[in-house]
Image: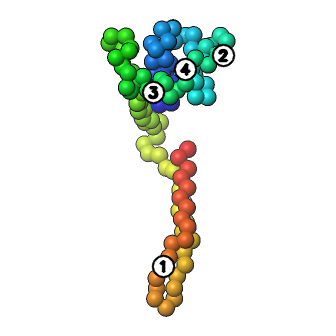
């Protein structure tokens, strides 16, 4: 949901920069493209640069919101259980009891 919201905001910003309707634009692989022709119109880096550092070049009252947050709330169940595991590969000195961590893994199944 956050990625979709950010894409929408980026397209709105690109539309303001290019003075084109958002419906004529798509975002693909680091670029804003012309929806009809696939022509690269603007790299994401330029959208970000204008959105953060050149808002003076945008229409009056335009909000260049390039940070979004969305939250998911489970409503069907009282609680959610996830599965996870952590493992460590260690080296133990039996004389001193010193433990040396060689590798550590953490895996979470959030779905």
Inspect this view and state whether residue 86 appears.
Answer: yes
Mark 1–mark 3 contact, CB under 8 Å?
no
Q: Residue at x 53, y 46 (%)?
A: 110
Mark 1 against mark 3, which lies toward the viewer?
A: 3
Q: Residues within 10 Å of mark 1 (few under 14, many from 20)?
A: few
Per the model, the C-alpha gap separating discs 2 and 3 is 21 Å
Q: Which residue is mark 4?
A: 42
Q: Which residue is mark 2?
A: 38
Label located before the other in sequence (1 or 4): 4
Q: How is the image coloured?
A: rainbow
Mark 2 against mark 1, which lies toward the viewer?
A: 2
Q: Which residue is mark 1?
A: 99
Per the model, the C-alpha gap separating discs 1 and 4 is 53 Å
**Nearest the camera: 91 or 53?**
53
Q: Which residue is mark 3?
A: 48
Please tell me how many numbered marks the rendered image carries.
Answer: 4
Label located before the other in sequence (2 or 3): 2
**Nearest the camera: 45 or 92?**
45
Label located before the other in sequence (3 or 4): 4
Q: Residues within 10 Å of mark 2 (few under 14, many from 20)?
A: few
Q: Residues within 10 Å of mark 3 (few under 14, many from 20)?
A: some
Per the model, the C-alpha gap separating discs 1 and 3 is 47 Å
**Nearest the camera: 60 or 71?**
60
Q: Residue furthest bottom?
A: 95
What is the x, y in percent for residue 3?
Answer: 50, 30
What is the x, y in percent for residue 50?
Answer: 42, 22
Q: Secondary structure at mark 1?
A: strand
Inspect this view and state whether residue 4 appears.
Answer: no
């Amino acid at each position: 949901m956050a990625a979709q919201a950010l894409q929408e905001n980026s397209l709105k910003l690109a539309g303001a920069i290019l003075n084109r309707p958002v419906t004529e634009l798509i975002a693909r692989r680091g670029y804003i493209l012309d929806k009809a022709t696939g022509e690269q119109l603007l790299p994401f880096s330029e959208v970000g640069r204008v959105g953060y550092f050149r808002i003076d070049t945008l229409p009056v009252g335009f909000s260049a919101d390039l940070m979004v947050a969305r939250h998911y709330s489970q409503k069907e169940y009282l609680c959610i259980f996830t599965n996870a595991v952590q493992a460590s590969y260690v080296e133990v000195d039996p004389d001193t009891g010193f433990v040396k961590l060689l590798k550590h893994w953490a895996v979470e199944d959030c779905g």
